[in-house]
Image (spheres, rainbow, N blue to C red):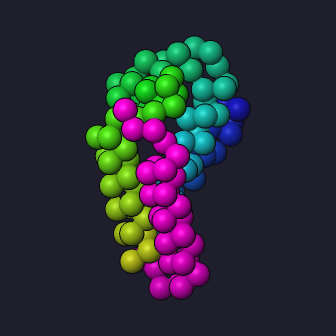
Amino acid sequence: MLVGGLVFVGLGALGVVLPVLPTTPFLLLAAYCFSKSSIRFHRWLCSTHLYQKHMASYVNEQSMPLRTKLFILLWSSTAMIAAASMTSVILVRIILTIILIFHWWYFIFCIKTK
């Protein structure tokens, strides 16, 4: 799992430079792999300010404050729109648009608001 985490961090870092490659899903997968690789690392990850602020409520209560939902939606949507606008491949634009619509639908209808 540690090696998988390192691979996903590398792919996430490439996603910063390459507009077609998404960053966030790879970094989330890296965090998952790292958290499963070591109990000590998992405890550290769960104690970070970023985790406590944005993910702890969802993990513990399956809900998020409205402010957190909007923060995540706006930043991730901005990244996807930027990636779609930087590519000339129509299929990539269509896929990103579908992901963006699903993302908003999921956050609005499937994740409870505190």
At 32% from the left edge and 40% from the top edge, which residue is drawn? Answer: 66
Relative to the observer, which residue lies in front, 80 or 97? 97
Q: Is residue 3 above or below residue 12?
A: above
Residue 51 figure quarter? top left
Point out the residue furthest to the left here: 67
36 within the magenta span: no
Q: Is residue 93 above or below residue 61?
A: below
Left-right relation of 91 to 109? right
Q: State which region is magenta.
A: 86-114
The picture places residue 105, in percent across and down from the top left corner, at 49, 57
At 50% from the left edge and 78% from the top edge, which residue is drawn? Answer: 93
At 39% from the left edge and 77% from the top edge, which residue is drawn? Answer: 85
Relative to the observer, which residue lies in front, 62 or 43? 62
105 within the magenta span: yes
The picture places residue 53, in percent across and down from the top left corner, at 35, 29
Left-right relation of 20 to 78? right
Relative to the observer, which residue lies in front, 50 or 20? 50
* Quadrant the N terminus occupies: top right
The picture places residue 19, in percent across and down from the top left corner, at 46, 68
* Quadrant the C terminus occupies: top left
Left-right relation of 81 to 67? right
One can see residue 18 in this view: no
Secondary structure, magenta segment, majority class: helix
Residue 98 figure quarter? bottom right
The picture places residue 39, in percent across and down from the top left corner, at 62, 15
One can see residue 103 in this view: yes
Q: How many marks?
A: 0
Relative to the observer, which residue lies in front, 62 or 90? 62
